[in-house]
Image: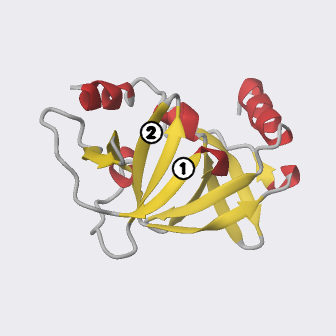
Amino acid sequence: MSESRQDATSSKVTAGVNEFLTFTLGHEEYGMEITKVQEIRGYDAVTKLANTPEFLKGITNLRGIIVPIIDMRIKFNMAHAEYNDLTVVIIINVAHRVVGMVVDGVSDVITLAPDQIKPAPEFGGAIDTKYVMGIGAVDDRMLILVDIEKLMSSQDMDLVETAAAA
Protein backbone atom coordinates (compact mmCIF):
# COMPACT_ATOMS: atom_id res chain seq x y z
CA MET A 1 0.00 0.00 0.00
CA SER A 2 1.26 3.43 -0.77
CA GLU A 3 2.19 5.66 2.12
CA SER A 4 -0.49 8.21 1.20
CA ARG A 5 -3.28 5.58 1.31
CA GLN A 6 -2.08 4.36 4.71
CA ASP A 7 -2.02 7.94 5.96
CA ALA A 8 -5.51 8.60 4.58
CA THR A 9 -6.86 5.46 6.27
CA SER A 10 -5.28 6.19 9.62
CA SER A 11 -6.26 9.87 9.55
CA LYS A 12 -9.92 9.00 8.86
CA VAL A 13 -9.93 6.48 11.70
CA THR A 14 -8.26 8.79 14.20
CA ALA A 15 -10.58 11.60 13.13
CA GLY A 16 -13.44 9.65 14.72
CA VAL A 17 -14.72 7.67 11.71
CA ASN A 18 -15.07 4.39 13.53
CA GLU A 19 -18.75 3.44 13.32
CA PHE A 20 -19.67 1.42 10.27
CA LEU A 21 -22.92 0.09 8.85
CA THR A 22 -22.21 -3.47 7.72
CA PHE A 23 -23.88 -4.91 4.64
CA THR A 24 -23.52 -7.99 2.50
CA LEU A 25 -22.95 -8.52 -1.19
CA GLY A 26 -22.84 -12.21 -2.01
CA HIS A 27 -20.67 -13.95 0.58
CA GLU A 28 -18.67 -10.84 1.44
CA GLU A 29 -19.32 -8.40 4.25
CA TYR A 30 -18.66 -4.71 3.76
CA GLY A 31 -18.70 -1.66 5.97
CA MET A 32 -19.31 2.01 5.27
CA GLU A 33 -19.19 5.08 7.48
CA ILE A 34 -22.49 5.33 9.35
CA THR A 35 -22.41 9.12 9.05
CA LYS A 36 -23.14 8.79 5.30
CA VAL A 37 -26.32 6.75 5.84
CA GLN A 38 -29.63 8.60 5.63
CA GLU A 39 -32.00 5.62 5.84
CA ILE A 40 -32.48 1.97 4.95
CA ARG A 41 -35.47 0.88 2.86
CA GLY A 42 -36.78 -2.27 1.26
CA TYR A 43 -36.17 -2.59 -2.46
CA ASP A 44 -39.02 -1.21 -4.58
CA ALA A 45 -39.44 -1.02 -8.33
CA VAL A 46 -37.54 1.82 -9.97
CA THR A 47 -38.08 3.88 -13.10
CA LYS A 48 -35.52 2.77 -15.65
CA LEU A 49 -33.62 5.33 -17.72
CA ALA A 50 -32.40 4.74 -21.26
CA ASN A 51 -28.71 4.84 -22.14
CA THR A 52 -27.39 4.58 -18.58
CA PRO A 53 -24.66 2.33 -17.20
CA GLU A 54 -25.79 -1.17 -16.24
CA PHE A 55 -25.14 -0.56 -12.52
CA LEU A 56 -27.70 2.28 -12.53
CA LYS A 57 -30.94 0.35 -11.99
CA GLY A 58 -33.04 3.50 -12.38
CA ILE A 59 -34.43 6.30 -10.26
CA THR A 60 -37.06 6.61 -7.56
CA ASN A 61 -38.92 9.48 -5.96
CA LEU A 62 -38.10 9.70 -2.26
CA ARG A 63 -40.32 12.34 -0.67
CA GLY A 64 -39.90 14.69 -3.64
CA ILE A 65 -36.20 13.98 -4.27
CA ILE A 66 -35.22 12.02 -7.39
CA VAL A 67 -32.73 9.40 -6.21
CA PRO A 68 -30.55 7.29 -8.54
CA ILE A 69 -30.48 3.62 -7.47
CA ILE A 70 -27.21 1.76 -7.96
CA ASP A 71 -26.86 -2.02 -7.78
CA MET A 72 -23.59 -2.53 -5.92
CA ARG A 73 -23.23 -6.13 -7.14
CA ILE A 74 -23.07 -4.88 -10.71
CA LYS A 75 -20.83 -1.96 -9.73
CA PHE A 76 -18.38 -4.39 -8.11
CA ASN A 77 -18.57 -6.86 -11.05
CA MET A 78 -20.21 -9.59 -8.99
CA ALA A 79 -22.80 -12.13 -10.09
CA HIS A 80 -26.31 -10.74 -10.51
CA ALA A 81 -28.48 -11.31 -7.47
CA GLU A 82 -32.10 -12.20 -7.28
CA TYR A 83 -33.95 -9.45 -5.46
CA ASN A 84 -35.92 -10.81 -2.51
CA ASP A 85 -37.38 -9.76 0.84
CA LEU A 86 -33.89 -9.32 2.30
CA THR A 87 -32.68 -7.02 -0.49
CA VAL A 88 -32.44 -3.46 0.78
CA VAL A 89 -31.57 -0.01 -0.47
CA ILE A 90 -29.24 2.04 1.68
CA ILE A 91 -30.00 5.71 1.08
CA ILE A 92 -26.78 7.66 1.47
CA ASN A 93 -25.89 11.31 1.35
CA VAL A 94 -22.48 11.87 -0.26
CA ALA A 95 -20.89 14.60 -2.32
CA HIS A 96 -24.00 16.80 -1.95
CA ARG A 97 -26.30 14.21 -3.49
CA VAL A 98 -28.65 11.49 -2.32
CA VAL A 99 -28.03 8.04 -3.82
CA GLY A 100 -29.54 4.62 -3.18
CA MET A 101 -27.33 1.52 -3.02
CA VAL A 102 -28.93 -1.90 -3.58
CA VAL A 103 -27.28 -4.51 -1.35
CA ASP A 104 -28.15 -8.10 -0.42
CA GLY A 105 -28.75 -7.23 3.22
CA VAL A 106 -27.77 -5.04 6.14
CA SER A 107 -26.21 -6.64 9.19
CA ASP A 108 -25.55 -4.15 11.98
CA VAL A 109 -23.64 -1.08 13.07
CA ILE A 110 -20.25 -1.80 14.58
CA THR A 111 -17.61 0.34 16.23
CA LEU A 112 -14.03 -0.40 15.30
CA ALA A 113 -11.03 0.72 17.31
CA PRO A 114 -8.12 2.05 15.23
CA ASP A 115 -6.13 -1.17 15.86
CA GLN A 116 -9.00 -3.23 14.37
CA ILE A 117 -8.62 -1.51 10.99
CA LYS A 118 -5.79 -2.71 8.78
CA PRO A 119 -4.64 -1.15 5.50
CA ALA A 120 -6.08 -2.70 2.37
CA PRO A 121 -3.62 -5.10 0.74
CA GLU A 122 -2.03 -4.11 -2.56
CA PHE A 123 -2.66 -6.41 -5.49
CA GLY A 124 -0.74 -4.49 -8.11
CA GLY A 125 -2.84 -3.69 -11.16
CA ALA A 126 -4.93 -6.89 -10.92
CA ILE A 127 -7.51 -5.59 -8.43
CA ASP A 128 -8.60 -2.00 -7.99
CA THR A 129 -8.57 -1.15 -4.27
CA LYS A 130 -8.79 2.64 -4.57
CA TYR A 131 -12.25 2.65 -2.93
CA VAL A 132 -11.19 0.42 -0.03
CA MET A 133 -10.51 2.33 3.18
CA GLY A 134 -9.14 -0.70 4.94
CA ILE A 135 -10.01 -4.12 6.32
CA GLY A 136 -11.86 -4.30 9.61
CA ALA A 137 -11.26 -7.29 11.84
CA VAL A 138 -13.89 -8.09 14.46
CA ASP A 139 -13.67 -11.48 16.17
CA ASP A 140 -13.81 -13.94 13.25
CA ARG A 141 -15.31 -11.40 10.82
CA MET A 142 -13.42 -9.57 8.10
CA LEU A 143 -15.08 -6.42 6.77
CA ILE A 144 -14.11 -4.66 3.57
CA LEU A 145 -14.38 -0.99 4.55
CA VAL A 146 -15.52 1.02 1.54
CA ASP A 147 -14.72 4.72 1.18
CA ILE A 148 -18.23 5.45 -0.09
CA GLU A 149 -17.53 9.16 -0.61
CA LYS A 150 -14.63 8.36 -2.93
CA LEU A 151 -16.62 5.67 -4.75
CA MET A 152 -19.70 7.80 -5.33
CA SER A 153 -17.73 10.85 -6.46
CA SER A 154 -15.52 8.88 -8.85
CA GLN A 155 -15.51 9.68 -12.54
CA ASP A 156 -17.59 6.67 -13.59
CA MET A 157 -20.22 7.46 -10.96
CA ASP A 158 -20.55 11.01 -12.29
CA LEU A 159 -22.66 9.34 -14.95
CA VAL A 160 -25.26 8.89 -12.24
CA GLU A 161 -25.56 12.65 -11.73
CA THR A 162 -25.80 13.22 -15.50
CA ALA A 163 -28.38 10.45 -15.98
CA ALA A 164 -30.50 11.54 -13.01
CA ALA A 165 -30.54 15.13 -14.23
CA ALA A 166 -31.70 14.09 -17.72
The dot on residue 87 is none
| Closest to the observer, 134 or 88 | 88
Residue 58 percent across, percent down from the top left: 24, 45
Q: Residues within 10 Å of mark 2 (few under 14, many from 20)?
A: some
Name which residue lies at 68% across and 69% down.
141
Residue placed furthest toward the left: 50
Residue 43 percent across, percent down from the top left: 33, 63
Structure colour scheme: secondary structure
Q: Earlier in the sequence, mark 2 or mark 1?
A: 1
What is the three-letter code of the residue carrying label 2?
Val
Q: Is residue 130 visible?
A: no
Name which residue lies at 76% across and 44% down.
17
Kindly identify which residue carries mark 1.
38
Real-space CA distance between mark 2 and mark 1, rounded to the nearest whole angstrom: 9 Å
Give the left or right position of residue 84, taking residue 120 as reference. left
Kindly identify which residue carries mark 2.
98
Name which residue lies at 51% across and 55% down.
39
Name which residue lies at 73% across and 54% down.
19
Above or below — where is 97 with respect to 77? above
Residue 14 percent across, percent down from the top left: 86, 40
